Amino acid sequence: SSLLRWRYVSGYCDYYWQIDDVKVVTGCRPRDGGLVAGRVLDANTRRPLAGVTVTGDGGAAATTNDDGVYVLFADKGVRMVTAIPPAGYGSAEVSVQVLSSQVARKNLALTAGRILAGPKALSVTVGAGSKARRVVMLRNSGTAPVSLNIDGTTSWLLLSPASGGLSVGASKPITAVFDARELAVGVYSTSLHVRGNTPYAVLSIPVTMTVVKEAAEWR
């Protein structure tokens, strides 16, 4: 059975009302399919990702909750489910066998680059009028390639290279040159900020250079 309801709102020309072109037909049939449910996770940390849109190839879509859970309807058969990635992540797509009136469970993991640095801080003593150098190793411990750039250089600190890319598992040496040739004796500080196309926080490396009276040999 069906129930039709309408509201009559009084207003201009409120002395009449009418309904026309109403047609009730039968023959609607339920679609043969089931539910697809799972979680969307960070492939590096395995933490759930909230607010991610998940779509099925039949047009259904769902958004993950705070626990990374999604549920959507899909037609019976082998179907594709895709997670649309937030900024910094790569997309994920999986196939799933959907059975009539059943729940198929399938998790999706979104890949991302992840930059690590060693050492985590730089500290050097340099003789007035001389230079020194140190090396910082950057490594991509994530599950996707990453492009990066480093800022925080000053008149007494230069980096080479200051940008580039890292494939999954790759490392890159960054040479830091400390120049005390025009500096007075004292302590100088800054921070290097390593930025990349990742969803994680900017990596900061504290840097301290102590300039002393004795001239230091180039190292």
Image (tube, helix red, strand yellow):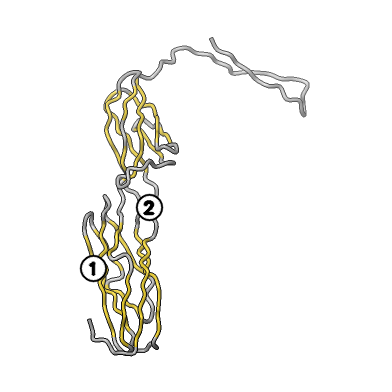
Sort mark 2 into few (<14), some (14-19) or many (20+) by Cα contacts within 10 Å.
some
- Select label 1 or label 2 by which is in front: 1
| Total marks in image | 2
Residue depicted at x 30% and y 67%: 163
Quarter-of-image position of residue 109: top left
Residue depicted at x 29% and y 75%: 176
Residue depicted at x 34% and y 41%: 41
Q: Amino acid at mark 2?
A: Pro
The secondary element bearing badge 1 is classed as strand
The label on residue 134 is: none
Quarter-of-image position of residue 82: top left
Q: Nearer the viewer, residue 118 or 172?
A: 118
Query: Is there a contact, CB below 8 Å, between mark 1 and mark 2?
Result: no
- Viewport quadrant of the C terminus: bottom left
Q: Amino acid at mark 1?
A: Pro
Image spot of residue 96 (x, y percent): 28, 29
The secondary element bearing badge 2 is classed as loop
Q: Nearer the viewer, residue 107 or 92?
A: 107
Q: Which residue is mark 2?
A: 199
Q: Is residue 27 above or below residue 171?
A: above
Q: Which residue is mark 1?
A: 173
Q: Is residue 14 left or right of residue 79?
A: right
- Report how far apart the C-alphas of labels 1 and 2 lie in the structure: 23 Å
Image spot of residue 159 (x, y percent): 30, 74
Q: Is residue 78 above or below residue 175?
A: above
Sort mark 1 into few (<14), some (14-19) or many (20+) by Cα contacts within 10 Å.
some
Image spot of residue 92 (x, y percent): 30, 41
Q: Nearer the viewer, residue 180 or 166?
A: 180
